[in-house]
Image (cartoon, rainbow, N blue to C red):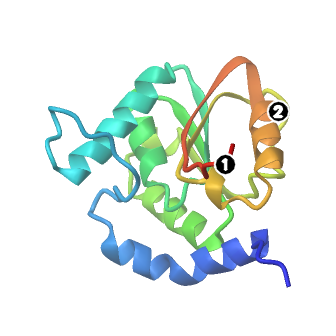
Amino acid sequence: MSNRYTETDTESYYDAEDGIYRAIWDEDGSVHWGFFDDNTGGDFLKACANLNRIMAEKGRIKDDASVLDLGCGNGTTAIWLSKAQGCRVTGVDLSGVRVDNAKADRLRQDSALQDRLVFEKASATDLPFRDGAFTHVWSQATIYHVHDKIAALKEAYRVLDDGGIMVFDDLTKPQPN
């Protein structure tokens, strides 16, 4: 019996557990990693917002960017990114429940922001976009959930335009020497 999980396992888990995740989020959906510094002190939510800002800055995401949010969840960070940077964001997630939540949250935004946001159910290992479709790929706490990380990274590279930037955070598993 294999201990490896499948993409279907991951999708089923997040579809079934979304209610729990939404119950523990703050109003802005800031349950992801954070970067603590002198400005955040010990405030976790400030650290989460700080990490978002750092990633957008280091990724050089500006208002002319077309960003793929890989593993967008309920869309909170994609909405923040579009608001804060003025860019277009396409969010994809394996969970249909989360994509539906993101679409509903998108409709609560002003029309200018709605026009810059798209959410689709898709696998990180088989993205439904043309080669070079995005100037940036953004991903927070997602790749470690993907059953075939190499395929996901190849797909991210494929959909990036020449000179595009992938900005992400992720967990790594130490390997013995």
Q: Residue at x 22, y 45 (%)?
A: 46
Work out whether 140 lies above or below 66: below
Place of residue 157 in the rendered image (x, y in percent of width and height, measured from the top left)? 77, 32
Place of residue 149 in the rendered image (x, y in percent of width and height, measured from the top left)? 76, 50
Q: Nearer the viewer, residue 82 or 57?
A: 57
Q: Nearer the viewer, residue 167 or 131?
A: 167
SS for callout 2: helix
- Left-right relation of 132 to 52: right
| Residue 119: mark in rendering | none
Question: CB atoms at circles 1 and 2 under 8 Å apart?
Answer: no
Mark-to-mark CA distance, 1 and 2: 28 Å
Which residue ends up furthest to the top in the rendered image?
A: 163
* Residue under label 1: 175
Q: Residue at x 44, y 41 (%)?
A: 113
The quarter of the picture where the N terminus appears is: bottom right
* Residue under label 2: 158
- Left-right relation of 163 to 109: right
Place of residue 67 in the rendered image (x, y in percent of width and height, measured from the top left)? 60, 34
Whether residue 12 is visible here, answered yes or no, is yes
Q: How many marks?
A: 2
Work out whether 51 lies above or below 144: above
Whether residue 128 is visible here, answered yes or no, is no
Hey, what amino acid is under mark 1?
A: Gln
Q: Residue at x 27, y 62 (%)?
A: 27
> Which of the two discs, 1 and 2, sits closer to the camera?
1
Place of residue 55 in the rendered image (x, y in percent of width and height, measured from the top left)? 44, 31
Hey, what amino acid is under mark 2?
A: Arg
Q: Quadrant of residue 132?
A: top right
Neighbourhood count class around disc 1 (C-alpha, 10 Å): few under 14, some 14–19, many 20 upward: few
